[in-house]
Amino acid sequence: MPRKPAAPAPDDSAPSAQAPARGRKRMQMADIARLAGVSASTVSRALSGSPLIPQATRERITELANSLGYRVNVGAANLRKRGVQTIGVVILGDSMQMISDPFLLSILGSVADTLDERGMSLLLTRLKADRQHVLSDLVESGQVGGLIVIGQLTLHDYLNELTRNGFPMVVWGAPLPDALYPVVGGDNAMGGYLATRHLIEKGCRRIAFFGDITHPEAGQRYLGYTRALDEAGIAMDPRLLQSFLFGDSRIREVIDGWLNQATPFDAIFASSDVTAISLMGSLNERGITVPADVKLVGYDDIALAEHVHPTLTTIRQPTGQAGRALVDLLFEALAGQPRRSIVLPASLIVRESSA
Amino acid sequence: MPRKPAAPAPDDSAPSAQAPARGRKRMQMADIARLAGVSASTVSRALSGSPLIPQATRERITELANSLGYRVNVGAANLRKRGVQTIGVVILGDSMQMISDPFLLSILGSVADTLDERGMSLLLTRLKADRQHVLSDLVESGQVGGLIVIGQLTLHDYLNELTRNGFPMVVWGAPLPDALYPVVGGDNAMGGYLATRHLIEKGCRRIAFFGDITHPEAGQRYLGYTRALDEAGIAMDPRLLQSFLFGDSRIREVIDGWLNQATPFDAIFASSDVTAISLMGSLNERGITVPADVKLVGYDDIALAEHVHPTLTTIRQPTGQAGRALVDLLFEALAGQPRRSIVLPASLIVRESSA
DNA sequence: CTGAAAGCGCTAACAG
DNA sequence: CTGTTAGCGCTTTCAG
């Protein structure tokens, strides 16, 4: 299908920079070769650690190159090798602020570290919802060898299409039944279940759920929530479900409105820590004390969760594992191995807000 | 000077991926040329919007290319054009977690958006303190045309050296007197002054300062703090200074220790919102109420500041402007224009914690 | 073990 | 206006 934008039309004002203003001219392999009294081929092989070159020569050349601050031009090398050492990481952003949720950021951090360990670079792109085509452009233009998509699954159909076209890509999210692409995600149903069961064990009976259940991840958490209620023989009250958009900056207003309904409740399970922390504020303003009056459980275990007061009980998602899993799966896809998904464990972290 | 590591020794297991496993072969300019019945040069010109090509042909070719999902290979184009369209963004990380402070992240977001607008890509790298050489490698290897360094200025001397060597680079931080590199930063002295004066106006006399004053940014804030105290004729009590490392994950312990000293105080000015929010927790635990017993002002105005309870009075640093300023200065450096620095205004945002 | 030669995919003179 | 030609800096056959 045709893409909307014509030529990418790069801003003409963008400097195409390479040579430092001052400073010695950039050296290249030929220079090293001359200085070492060998051919460029030999330098190339030495620098890439080819066993064809004897240890001694290899070291001599490597040392020479290093002492001159020479680095192989990766662009040229990639062109010749017909492949790139760069992975595109795309953060889906729905709100103004690119980076809203600290949780997604810690996944970004983990991915960055993992790629670094594996000797690959990370090209970061923020994707506004209407510019899906950027995803395929990134790959088609040879800028990146594969894609890691972090964020909401509003692009489900498009991602499926890309996968059908053989795009190497992995997604952080919830494994949808008809997803063709590999997914790494937390065990949201389990997380929702653990959080809710914990509140029930604490004696709560009227547990509210805050989260947009049309969003796959939150939807799974909601399922876990209902399962726990069922198991305890607690009837669901639909008024206790407050669905709102993930990352909505107006969380507070929504919360206030909900509180105004005067629906009785003794606990809230929020489908993100950011939501939970906002809730704390709103509850406090109303003179409702956490955990005495209302117990509260969040989701994600962001760093701040143990720094707010009261400290926040939450479901931890292992972000470190997430980064590694994403990169692993992408590498598998790149190697043409069969697609698989990974579900990471969710664990309950009990703190003061549910005491 | 020689670098430590020998050849970068890329991990052999890293897949050098380009061709999708399945799916049609990647097309190239020659294919488009053939299909359009013109030469590759014409396609190249048409796609880059050259005025040499008549409107009609240009559109025809562009459309053909788009309909086939063709994108020019940026690697090859860059090689020929001898320049890259990628900027390296380096986040200095001292703690385990790459990304600790939400404030730095919103700068990252802003930089990402600005670069995107300017048609440039962003290569993200996290830098552990001991691997400085990565900075120059990034440029020497031609991966990026310039560098934006975000974070602490522990690398001051190294950055100066790079600048002397003509490295195109900009830093987010405090403009040190002997810095040779361009710096974008907030007006820390003003911020510290505004925060402190505000607390004094609220009737506070024993105002504590939390922040590592050996860090240039916090040091400036501390200067503003002392100036405001001086102006009000309030004597400084050295016991009211709690210096600790920025981003220290053990903030809470430090705080607790400090509180145990039983030094009387009626306000705290914390040099970051993260610190301030942690403080809220510790104070609360001790039965000290904010703002009734102790007033509190933070720094940065991170998103959560207005979501905690009580909402946090803080000094706002304009992150949107920060990103634009960083990119602007980098482009200037790239264009060989004389180096300059930019100081962004700091403004007081009054909320409940100082009421 | 090493060098010469041939491009990777594209753009920029240089001639039409 | 358009095509031809010659590389960008590197890696990799292919012969020594």
Image: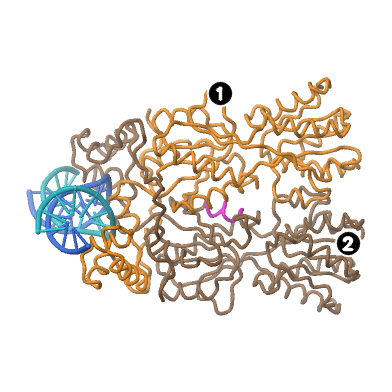
Chain colours: A brown, B orange, C cyan, D blue
**Residue B157 colored magenta?**
no
Q: Assign the magenta stretch its main secondary structure.
A: helix
Q: Which quadrant of the view contains residue B175?
A: top right
- Left or right: A220, with A78 as reference point: right
Taking the image as drawn, is residue A45 in sight?
no
- In front: B244, or B353? B353
- In front: B293, or A269? B293
B58 w.r.t. A122: above or below: below
The residue that mark 2 highlights is A294
The residue that mark 1 highlights is B177
Q: Secondary structure at mark 1?
A: loop
Q: Position of residue B40 (x, y in %)?
A: 23, 63
- Left or right: B148, with B8 as reference point: right
> Chain for mark 1?
B
Q: Amino acid at mark 1?
A: Pro
Give the magenta range: A105-113
Taking the image as drawn, is residue A316 in sight?
yes
Q: Position of residue A111 (x, y in %)?
A: 53, 55
Residue at position x 37%, y 30% in the image: B2
Residue at position x 79%, y 36% in the image: B255
Mark 2 burial class by Cα count in 10 Å: few <14, some 14-19, many 20+: some
Residue at position x 37%, y 38% in the image: B6
Q: Quadrant of the N terminus of chain A?
A: bottom left
Q: Quadrant of the C terminus of chain A?
A: bottom right
Q: Position of residue A273 (x, y in %)?
A: 73, 58
Q: Position of residue A17 (x, y in %)?
A: 37, 43
Q: Secondary structure at mark 2?
A: loop
Distance in Å between CA atoms under marks 1 and 2:
53 Å
Residue A47 — which label?
A: none
A4 w.r.t. A122: above or below: below
**Residue A109 colored magenta?**
yes
